[in-house]
């Protein structure tokens, strides 16, 4: 029967290696599988860049932490293939038991898989950069629009304020009218303050 395969990829946002796809492994056992960048298995694969045989009698296997050993044995992993591209460990291909005939094929495909993953990551980064650039352009346009609107409102407000102050200073105006006009001036000043904040935001 086909050997179990699991693709474990590095997730930069969480700084952890986690399974991204799998076939032939217990989903329950694989669900708790994860590696930290500083773990022994990751360090060994980064440095050696060659398959790691899961053989309890080997010195390399004994180099792994007890937790890593238990995890690999519980899953039934036979070999761990590093996926390296541009001097980075992008992930690990876990190959299950019974894969002796297919192991050469998996090893040959590991380099191609790493290149494909690297290209996919670069494409994803490029798409994210473009999205951020378009968002920045939209924000810049919105800022320019807000600035223009603020200036268009501020200019007539200045004229309104001057006229109201002139009316409030009229000696013939009664006290009630003066108070009312002073309230209007205060409201104009409040609108002017909001416009100042809007201009500050648009900058």
Image (spheres, rainbow, N blue to C red):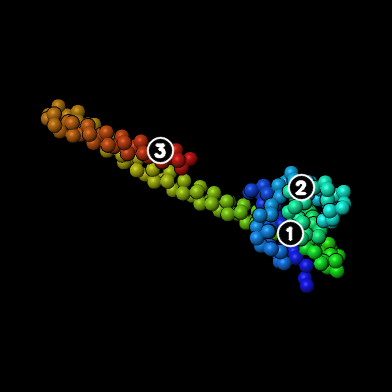
Q: Are marks 2 and 1 in contact (CB under 8 Å)?
A: no
Q: Is residue 152 above or below residue 21?
A: above
Q: CA distance from mark 1 to mark 3?
A: 60 Å
Q: Secondary structure at mark 3?
A: helix
Quarter residue 195 falls in: top left
Label 1 vs 3, first from the N-terminus: 1
Q: CA distance from mark 3 to mark 2?
A: 60 Å
> Residue 120: where, in percent of width, then height?
69, 59
Crowding around mark 1 (Cα neighbors within 10 Å: few <14, some 14 to 19, many 20+) is: many
- Please say whether residue 140 is visible from this viewpoint: yes
Q: Secondary structure at mark 1?
A: helix
Label 2 vs 1, first from the N-terminus: 2
> Residue 133: where, in percent of width, then height?
58, 51
On screen, residue 98 versus residue 196, left or right, reads: right
Query: Viewer-proximal residue, 21 or 141?
Result: 21
Q: CA distance from mark 2 to mark 1?
A: 14 Å
Q: Which residue is found at the position 50% from the left and 48% from the top?
A: 139
Residue under circle 1? 75
- Please say whether residue 112 is visible from this viewpoint: no
Q: Which mark lies nearer to you, 3 or 2?
A: 2
Residue under circle 3? 197
Q: Which residue is found at the position 87% from the left and 48% from the top?
A: 59
Label 3 vs 2, first from the N-terminus: 2
Residue under circle 2? 66
């Amino acid at each position: 029967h086909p050997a179990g395969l699991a693709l474990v990829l590095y997730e930069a946002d969480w700084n952890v290696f986690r399974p991204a796809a799998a076939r032939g492994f217990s989903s329950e056992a694989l669900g708790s599988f994860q590696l930290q960048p500083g773990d022994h298995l990751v360090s060994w694969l980064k440095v050696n860049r060659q398959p790691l045989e899961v053989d309890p009698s080997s010195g390399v296997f004994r180099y792994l932490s007890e937790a890593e050993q238990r995890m690999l044995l519980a899953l039934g992993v036979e070999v761990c293939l590093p996926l390296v591209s541009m001097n980075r460990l992008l992930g690990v291909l876990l190959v299950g038991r019974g894969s002796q005939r297919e192991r050469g094929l998996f090893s040959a495909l590991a380099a191609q898989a790493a290149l494909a993953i690297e290209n996919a990551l670069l494409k994803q980064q490029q798409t994210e950069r473009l999205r951020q650039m378009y968002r920045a352009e939209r924000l810049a346009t919105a800022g320019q629009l807000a600035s223009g609107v603020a200036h268009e409102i501020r200019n007539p407000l200045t004229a309104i304020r001057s006229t109201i102050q002139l009316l409030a200073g009229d000696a013939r105006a009664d006290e009630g009218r003066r108070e009312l006009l002073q309230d209007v001036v205060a409201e104009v000043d409040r609108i002017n303050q909001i416009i100042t904040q809007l201009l500050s935001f648009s900058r």
